[in-house]
């Protein structure tokens, strides 16, 4: 069921064995390497995003969802595809869980960066409102404060300078997000890539084809924005119900296999324990018989 993957940093949690998915002529491989961490993630599902134009459903993008294999251990839910697809807590756990996620959005229709980013931030605002996240929930973050002396530096390909990782307030994060996309144009076949870290930062990258760059273009350190973008795709009212259903189906199968494997392991352990108990009982009986024989021998010796 699992394939062991080795990296220079050590051993990564084994990847589940999954197949690729072909959606509207867009191929999503079984695994990819995240441009944010260089870790390999598995394909959890894929589906289309579309819009209604005069009564016709027109596909605008195709979306692939990748997860860190640790996600399978962290998801406490297990059920049928239909149960998981309808479960808000299940997908909230995916959105907020402390493991890596990666989203690949491939264009079927041409879009400008401004069109895409404005629609995404509009969806994020709706999600924050539905979750009761107010405008001051992250106001403690100081945008004008100097970074701490030990802050790591990161090369920003947009400004062409080195700078510290910045924890943006939500408002600044939205502005930064819009800036990243402002002058971009995405023809059919181009892709937008989102990598989500376990701590909630968002790395954005772009690709003109099916390839995935080794590094992202920029990172935005704001958990609210990162989670809202992911929620806007696979959440209850996300833009891709097909991707949500695909994730539910594949994870239901994987968790069923994992549960079956755990059941077999527990059964094996029970058998081993029963065998050990039997061996101990046999040994105790043998020791007792030997002791009885010795006692009988001593008694006969005394009588003689």
Image (tube, rainbow, N blue to C red):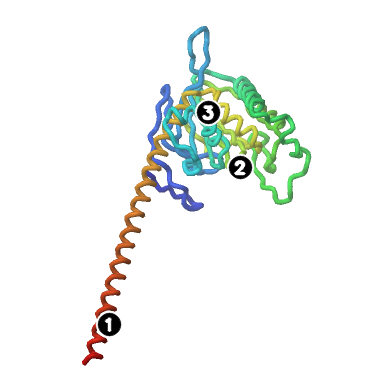
Left/right of residue 188 with respect to residue 150 in the rendered view:
left
Answer whether labels 2 and 1 touch (C-beta < 8 Å): no
State the CA–CA distance, disc 2 to disc 1.
70 Å
Q: Nearer the viewer, residue 107 or 122?
A: 122
Left/right of residue 183 with respect to residue 104 in the rendered view:
right
Question: What element does badge 3 sit on?
Answer: helix
Q: Nearer the viewer, residue 21 or 35?
A: 21
State the CA–CA distance, disc 2 to disc 3.
19 Å
Check the image and name the residue furthest to the left. 304
Check the image and name the residue furthest to the bottom. 304
State the CA–CA distance, disc 1 to disc 3.
76 Å
How many residues crowd around disc 2 within 10 Å: few (fewer than 14), some, or many (20 or more)?
Answer: some
Q: Nearer the viewer, residue 302 or 5?
A: 302
Question: What element does badge 1 sit on?
Answer: helix
Which residue in the structure is indicated by mark 1?
Answer: 295
Does any portion of residue 182 appear in the rendered image? no
Which residue in the structure is indicated by mark 2?
Answer: 199
């Amino acid at each position: 069921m699992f394939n062991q993957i080795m990296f220079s940093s050590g051993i990564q949690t084994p990847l589940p064995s999954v197949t690729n998915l072909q959606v509207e002529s867009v191929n999503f491989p079984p695994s990819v390497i995240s441009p944010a961490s260089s870790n390999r993630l598995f394909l959890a599902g894929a589906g289309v995003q579309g819009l209604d134009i005069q009564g016709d459903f027109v596909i605008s993008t195709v979306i692939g969802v990748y997860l860190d294999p640790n996600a399978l251990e962290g998801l406490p839910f297990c059920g049928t595809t239909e149960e998981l697809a309808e479960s808000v807590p299940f997908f909230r756990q995916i959105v907020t869980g402390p493991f890596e996620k990666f989203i690949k959005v491939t264009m079927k229709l041409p879009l400008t960066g401004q069109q895409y980013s404005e629609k995404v931030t509009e969806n994020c605002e709706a999600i924050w409102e539905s979750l009761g996240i107010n405008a001051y929930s992250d106001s403690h973050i100081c945008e004008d404060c100097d970074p701490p002396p030990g802050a790591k530096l990161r090369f920003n390909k947009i400004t062409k300078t080195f700078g510290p990782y910045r924890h943006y307030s939500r408002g600044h994060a939205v502005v930064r997000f819009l800036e990243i996309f402002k002058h971009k144009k995405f023809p059919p076949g181009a892709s937008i890539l989102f990598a989500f870290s376990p701590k909630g930062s968002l790395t954005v990258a772009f690709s003109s084809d099916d390839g995935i760059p080794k590094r992202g273009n920029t990172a935005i350190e704001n958990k609210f924005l990162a989670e809202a973008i992911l929620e806007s795709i696979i959440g209850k009212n996300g833009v891709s119900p097909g991707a949500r259903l695909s994730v539910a189906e594949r994870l239901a199968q994987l968790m069923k296999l994992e549960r079956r494997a755990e059941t077999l392991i527990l059964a094996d352990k029970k058998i081993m324990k029963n065998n050990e108990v039997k061996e101990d009982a046999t040994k105790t009986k043998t020791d007792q018989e030997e002791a009885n024989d010795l006692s009988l021998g001593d008694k006969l010796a005394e009588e003689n």
